[in-house]
Structure formats: C-alpha cells, structure tokens
C-alpha cells in the first residue's frame, strides 16, 4: 500500500516518528530493515495499545500499525517475519540481577531442583567426576526447605561424597554457603573461630564445632580462597549468559551490586560489538566513603549511553528470612529470641544515602525484613528533606515483608518497589513462611497492596539468587501465586496476585522507568529502541496456569535478531 508525500516539517526524524505513529501512511516511508506482519503486538502504550505490524530501521522502531500501513516500509532488502497472529511484547528488562555471577555459575555444579540431601549429593558427585583436574568444587542453588529440619547444610553430608577437595556451594538466594570439612580446614575455621561482622559461622550447639553452614559475610572466609576466573573466562561466561538471556527474551538488565571489573567487561563487549543486552550498573557500596561516591558519580557521565550505563549505588542493610538475618520489627515466629539484624547502623546508612543522592547517584537498598524496609523509607525521606524534592527514583529491592503502615509511603515518596516474583514461588516458601509466621503472611510479597496504594512495581529475577532466571516463571508466580503444577502450599497469599498486564509492565516499562530510560525503551512505538520478543502463545488469551510454558520464538535487540526460532522471508 503506497503513501502520499507530505511537506517537510521541522524536527527531522522525530517528526517522521510522530507521523508514523499518529497518522500511519501520512508520509513516504523509507526502507525498513526488519518488518513484523500479522501479529498481535502489545505496545504497552496509549492511545494505541495494540497493533498488527511493526517496521524497524536501524536500532529504532519507525512505524506501527496495520499490515497495510506497514507495507509501505518494505523494500527489496527488508527482512520479513510473518507472525500468523502470534503475540509480540517489549523485551524483558530484568531490573535486579547479578549477571556475571549467574553466568559464571553456569559452569559450576547446579543444585537447583535437587530437593533432598541425596539428590544434592548426586549432583555434586556427577560434577566432581567431570572436573577431576580442578582444585575446588563450587556450585549453587540449594534450598533451605530441601534439608531435614535442624540439619541444614551439614559438612558431613558433603564429606560423604567429596573429601579430597574443598567444596563450596552457595544457597539459591546467595546468602548462605554449604562447605565440607576440607574447605573449613583450608580456611582455618574451627570451633574457636569468632565471626564478628554481619553473618555467622553456624556451630553445633552440642559440640561447638562448625557445621558447614556459613551465613552472609561469613561465606567470604571460604569464598575468598577459591580460584578466581581469569578475564577471558569471565568474558566467555558473559557471552554464554547473554545467549541464555536472549533465548528467554531478555533485552535489558540492571546489575544490582557491581564493581569496576564487571563494568569493564561490559565495556569490552560493547567495543567488540558483542553486547546483546542493555546494561545498567549499580555499584556495591559496602561502607562507601565519600571518595567512592565521588568516583561513581564521575563514571555516570562517562557511561550514559543506550548500551551501557552507570549511575547508581546499592546499599545492603539486612539479610534473608530463611536464615533469620533479615531485620524484622517483631521477632521471628520460629525463633522468638531474634528479630534479625541490620548490617548498618541507621544513622550511618541514612547519611550515606544522603551523600550518594547529593552526588547525583540513584540509590538501591536491599531490604527484605519489614524493619529494614522502614529504615530505607526513613532514609529516603530524610534525603529528600535534606537535598530538596527531586526526581531521585529511590529503589527498595526485594521487600519480602512490609508493615501495613509503610505501604502508602512508597507512592508518597516516589520510591520504586523493585521485587522478584520468583522468590515467592510457593514451592520454596515452607521455611520462609514458618519464620515469618501467619500474622505477617498477608503482607508477604505485597505486590497488589503496593500497586493499589499507587507504588510503581518493577520486577526481576535476582539471578543467580533464585530458582529460575526465566521471566515466564516470574510472570506465572506474579499472576497465579501458585507453583507451576498448581499446588498452593505455604506463602500462597492469593490477595497479593496481580493482573497479567501489571506484571508485564513491571518487567518492561517499569524497568525502563527504574533506570531513567522510559523515553527510549520499554514500549513498541515509533522512536523507541527496537527491543522486542515474539512468543509461542498469547499470554492474554491462554489459561494463566500455562504462562510458565511460554517459549520465545524471536528476540530482537537494538534492531538485530539475537535469538531466532521463527522463519523469515524476503519481500
């Protein structure tokens, strides 16, 4: 279908995009490099949330509308995908991830889904047999609920299968480690070891000897001794991780707690034209000094492009529910003597937040317990009062529990609720629910409550600190609050489910807003970056319990096909 020429207007490409969106066919289309026809395309944008076809030129979407309207963009060199009614949505934006750690973990022992001591032992043995020349056995993915009660992460269970090499295995949430006797000896950890920082060397109450379970910072007593991967190994792992991410429809990530080394790895991939994800980096603060903050603020100016950004800092002020290290207002239901603890004194944390904000850095805060969430909100409110009202886009990460009195503060302060639906998979919630107790369960992973109160939801995986990187598993939990096989065990909380559209926005437009990029990505409209995915089934029309079965047939990143299981054709 042809199009009439119109007089040239001021604004150049921006005017062309405006015409293509609001008046399709009103201008003479140039050649599109990529065209999608005959689909159900969710644009995530008003006034036109649904279209049939898209045209992409370079890295941008240049037109959206009906098949007839997009025909004008097709030229001899155009690559065409006939969708036959398939659903298209913006690429997923995983807004809280530890991508390098997850990518390196792909080459380690995988304990995800091994839900008995025997099953975990088998995984370790199988891995060790394929790594006979390596000095250490490392891995991750074990779940607290998969151990017998009061026998979590015992060294004897690892000693029974590997005695001659140190074994270091991270829990699925990244907040605990399970090690064997050899690893304890190499690290010099004995019954006399006293760990005074945030964390614990768990000891047998009868013998006083270390059990092999290391919580929080105590992990580093062993972890620091394990061989570090070379730079080439790290780059290779990132490439492997990006292939997996592309196959899952991920086109953007926000790294929650990074360092200069990881930033430089992404920079190398940009220079080599190998980066297939947009990356935003938040630096891990520790006890950040003003010099650190000033240095990170300077990097914000250098790394501020469409592929690689830096300009945020992450504070971590508590641990996790399962190991009783999350900071709670009231004592744990199954450990009445404990309310958890914070890794920061409040005044120190509050002042560090204000300094980072004043330097122009966005602030993330890891806060899982309801007391930690309140600390973060208090610190953000103090920073806004001290530095003046501005578009800070403060973020709280995880928010697994929240006091009902604090729900409305998110919207009032403009704080982003950055959450991971996959952490609420009811199949993993037994130990979690017992620790929280029935009185607090209605406010567990309070997605709907926060949404109703006007908070902006942002979703992610926290990979590798999760049971699955797959965004469709996260969508499934957010919408159904059930396991993939339909069971609703502990932690179900159906009143906190959200709609499919809410969940999709939290994985797309919400993520773009969270990194100050909502004007460039997250929606499938002309002028936006061409990051999109074609799905095997229509999420809006299927039984919601089948969401987790969805596959990605096509991933387009920056206008380029980076994953394909769908044929294309020439004009």
Image: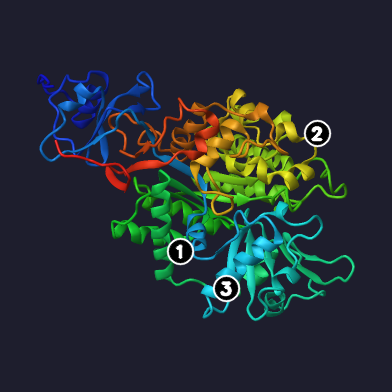
Which residue does the numbered mark 2 point to in the structure image?
439
Classed neighbour count for the residue bearing mark 3: other residues with Cα under 10 Å, few (<14), some (14–19), many (≥20): many
From the viewer's perspective, is 489 left or right of 553? right
Q: CA distance from mark 2 to mark 1?
A: 44 Å
Q: Which residue is mark 3?
A: 128
Quadrant of the image occupied by residue 1 = top left
Q: At which x and y percent is residue 82?
A: 25, 33
Specify the quadrant of the image occupied by residue 249.
top left
Assign a secondary structure to mark 1: helix
349 relative position to 280: left or right: right
Front one among 472 and 416: 472
Tell me, yes or no, whether the two marked residues, 2 and 3, touch with CB atoms within 8 Å.
Answer: no
Q: Nearer the viewer, mark 2 or mark 1?
A: 2
Q: Which residue is pictured at 54% across the width and 40% down the height?
A: 474
The residue pinned by badge 1 equals 261
Image quarter hosting the C terminus: top left
Identified at 71% across, 73% down, the residue is 160
Sequence order check: which comes first, mark 2 or mark 1?
1
Residue 4 position in % (x across, y down): 10, 19
Q: Earlier in the sequence, mark 3 or mark 1?
A: 3
């Amino acid at each position: 279908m042809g199009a009439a020429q119109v007089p040239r207007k001021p604004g150049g490409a921006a005017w062309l995009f405006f015409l293509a969106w609001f008046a399709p066919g009103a201008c003479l289309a140039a050649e599109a490099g990529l065209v999608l026809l005959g689909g159900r395309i969710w644009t995530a944008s008003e006034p036109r949330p649904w279209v049939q076809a898209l045209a992409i030129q370079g890295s941008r979407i240049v037109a959206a509308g009906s098949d007839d309207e997009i025909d004008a963009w097709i030229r001899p060199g155009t690559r065409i995908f006939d969708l036959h009614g398939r659903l298209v949505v913006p690429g997923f934006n995983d807004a809280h991830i530890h991508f390098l750690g997850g990518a390196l973990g792909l080459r380690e022992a995988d304990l995800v889904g091994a839900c008995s001591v025997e099953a975990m032992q088998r995984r370790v043995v199988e891995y060790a047999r394929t790594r006979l020349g390596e000095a250490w056995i490392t891995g991750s993915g074990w779940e607290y609920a998969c151990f017998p009660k009061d026998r979590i992460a015992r060294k004897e269970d690892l000693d029974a299968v590997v005695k001659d090499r140190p074994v270091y295995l991270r829990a699925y949430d990244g907040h605990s480690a399970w090690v064997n006797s050899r690893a304890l000896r190499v690290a010099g950890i004995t019954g006399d070891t006293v760990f005074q920082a945030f964390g614990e060397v768990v000891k047998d109450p009868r013998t006083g000897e270390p059990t092999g379970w290391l919580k929080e910072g105590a992990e580093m007593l062993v972890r620091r001794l394990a061989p570090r991967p070379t730079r080439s190994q790290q780059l290779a792992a990132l490439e492997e991780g990006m292939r997996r991410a592309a196959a899952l429809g991920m086109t953007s990530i926000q790294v929650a707690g990074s360092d200069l080394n990881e930033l430089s790895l992404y920079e190398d991939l940009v220079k080599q034209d190998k980066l297939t994800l947009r990356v935003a980096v938040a630096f891990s603060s520790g006890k950040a000094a003003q010099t650190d903050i000033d240095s990170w603020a300077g990097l914000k100016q250098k790394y501020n492009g469409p592929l690689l950004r830096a300009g945020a800092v992450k504070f971590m002020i508590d641990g996790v529910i399962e190991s009783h290290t999350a900071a709670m207002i009231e004592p744990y239901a199954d450990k009445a003597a404990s309310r958890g603890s914070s890794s920061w004194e409040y005044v120190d944390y509050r002042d560090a937040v204000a300094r980072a904000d004043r330097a122009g850095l966005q602030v993330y805060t890891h806060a899982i317990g309801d007391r930690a969430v309140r600390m973060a909100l208090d610190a953000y409110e103090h920073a806004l009062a001290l530095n003046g009202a501005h578009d800070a886009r403060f973020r709280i990460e995880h928010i697994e529990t929240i006091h009902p009195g604090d729900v409305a503060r998110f919207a009032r302060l403009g704080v982003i609720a950055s959450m991971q639906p996959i952490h609420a998979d009811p199949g993993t919630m037994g130990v979690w629910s017992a620790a929280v107790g029935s009185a607090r369960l209605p406010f567990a992973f309070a997605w709907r409550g926060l949404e109703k109160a006007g908070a902006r939801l942002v979703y992610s995986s926290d990979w590798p600190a999760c049971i699955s990187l797959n965004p469709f598993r996260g969508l499934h939990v957010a919408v159904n609050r059930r396991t993939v096989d339909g069971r609703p065990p502990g932690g179900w909380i159906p009143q906190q489910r959200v709609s499919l559209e809410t969940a999709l926005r939290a994985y797309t437009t919400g993520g773009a807003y969270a990194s100050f990029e909502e004007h460039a990505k997250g929606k499938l409209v002309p002028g936006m970056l061409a990051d999109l995915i074609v799905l095997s089934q229509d999420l809006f029309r299927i039984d919601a319990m089948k969401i987790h079965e969805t596959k990605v047939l096509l991933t387009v990143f920056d206008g380029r096909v980076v994953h394909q299981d769908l044929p294309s054709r020439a004009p």
